[in-house]
Image (tube, rainbow, N blue to C red):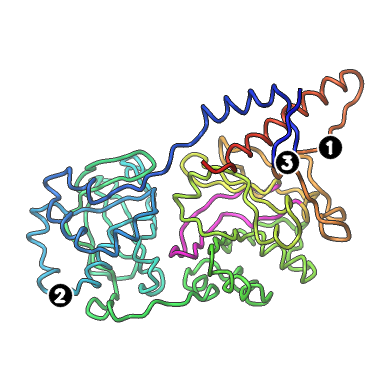
Amino acid sequence: MRSRSHYGFSITQNALALLYLFCIFTNPPASTALNFTALLSTVPDLSQFTALLASATPITADLSDRSSLSILAVPNAYLAADDHLARHHLSPAALADVLRYHVLLQFLSWSDLRALPPAGKLVTTLLQTTGRATDNFGSVNLTRDPQSGLVSIRSPAPYSPSNVTVLSLVKTLPYNVTIFAVNSLLIPYGLDLMASETRPNIVLNITKALIDGHNFNVAASMLAASGVVQEFEADEGGAGITLFVPVDDAFADLPPSVALQSLPADKKGVVLKFHVLHSYYPLGSLESVVNPFQPTLATEAMGAGSFTLNISRVNGSVAINTGIVQASVTQTVFDQNPVAIFGVSKVLLPREIFGRNPMVTAKPLEGAPPPDEDTLSPENSPGFGGQPSHLSSPPGFREDVRSHGGGCALQSSKFRLVQEFVLVASYCYLTPR
């Protein structure tokens, strides 16, 4: 027997049974925002730092929809001996910016600190998202002394006078938040503490933000020359945007068969739009994405079901698979609702344009799904000389079943059952609860 849903597709009783089990066992629980002040208040030795955080009400709003964080908290004894608060007579807004500098936008475990490379690790803080930190001075550099094992944290600015030492791991909720005790307040380099409350909120200039990131000059030039950056900035309103920007080395690693700069202007614009999601996703949201197949601005331009990105979490990092290229998020360039900009390790090449070109520039992430082998050729790209592709099943789910020899009917039957299951699973998530 078959039943018909109000979405217009028919499903068998077997598929309905699968839907029932799927909804029971995979229905995600309602997300609840962490109360960081309440979490810190469970540690008596951090009571003064917790009081400072509670008094800075804007930070509470900043943290309400975030996860995957590391917090640098100062114990009472060290905070009492710290003269920064008394010496600067910080305004409430300036104090909030100093405390934002103690919130790292990346989950770091104790083993992550012990495995820091000799050159250190640059991590973006909540301050960088405000636009008030010049260059990348809203980030911190973490280094570990190989002899003593001590981990130090300081501004990436040369000769920065402010630095702290990690004392201990206080509390951790895996892949959500870690709290480290440090021996002093960390003061951002070059921040005008007395004037931060009067500094206006900026309207993000995407090209300038990339140039300030110091490792995105090629992408910034391409965006400026193409003219699509104005479209991106116009889309900052509403649901916001998320940009994945390749680092400069990613362009240098492209094989000769990928003549990116030689593409016609319309195709080059589509490739750039392929790097943008038409919604704001902070890093924590990318790490816990429910639907891995995400449409891009190129999807809107070329047709539903085409030019999608497969986003997943692999070995603690966000992996992005285009079907022929697999990249990883390397850093947060900018993150302030409604705009998030992340650096990625490779140029995201859509298989609809580059499907026959081999990509062997780097080893894929261990444990990640391999890029698809059966890809589209450039001459058959959806929207280029043909009609846009409109798939009724999720992007990447092949609808052309080819059978050779015996067993064709059985394979087709299995395929239809799997397809129905995927459709009703999507229905389960789309139906309001």
List x then y, in percent, for residue 107: 37, 47
| Rendered view: 36 above or below 159 | above
Under mark 1, the amino acid is: Asp
Crowdedness near tag 1: few (<14), some (14–19) or many (≥20) residues, C-alpha within 10 Å: few
Q: Which residue is mark 2?
A: 88
Q: Which residue is mark 1?
A: 400
Residue 120 visible to the viewer: no
Q: Secondary structure at mark 3?
A: loop
Q: Are marks 2 and 3 in contact (CB under 8 Å)?
A: no
Residue 132 visible to the viewer: yes
Query: Which residues lie in the magenta part?
Result: 324-351
Tell which circle, 1 or 3, labels the residue nearer the N-terminal end: 3
Q: Secondary structure at mark 1?
A: loop
Q: Are marks 1 and 3 in contact (CB under 8 Å)?
A: no
The answer to whether residue 86 is left or right of residue 131 is left
Could you tell me which quadrant the N terminus lies in? top right
The answer to whether residue 11 is left or right of residue 19 is right
Which is more foreground, mark 2 or mark 3?
Answer: 3
Q: Which residue is mark 3?
A: 393
Write the residue at 32% across / 39% down.
Answer: 173
| Image-quadrant location for residue 303 | bottom right
Which secondary structure class fits the magenta region best? Answer: strand
Under mark 3, the amino acid is: Ser
Write the residue at 30% across / 45% down.
Answer: 178
Residue 330 inside the magenta-drawn segment: yes
Which is more foreground, mark 2 or mark 1?
Answer: 1
Write the residue at 28% across / 52% down.
Answer: 71
Tell which circle, 2 or 1, labels the residue nearer the N-terminal end: 2
| Image-quadrant location for residue 423 | top right
Between the C-alphas of marks 2 and 1, the distance is 68 Å
| Image-quadrant location for residue 218 | bottom right
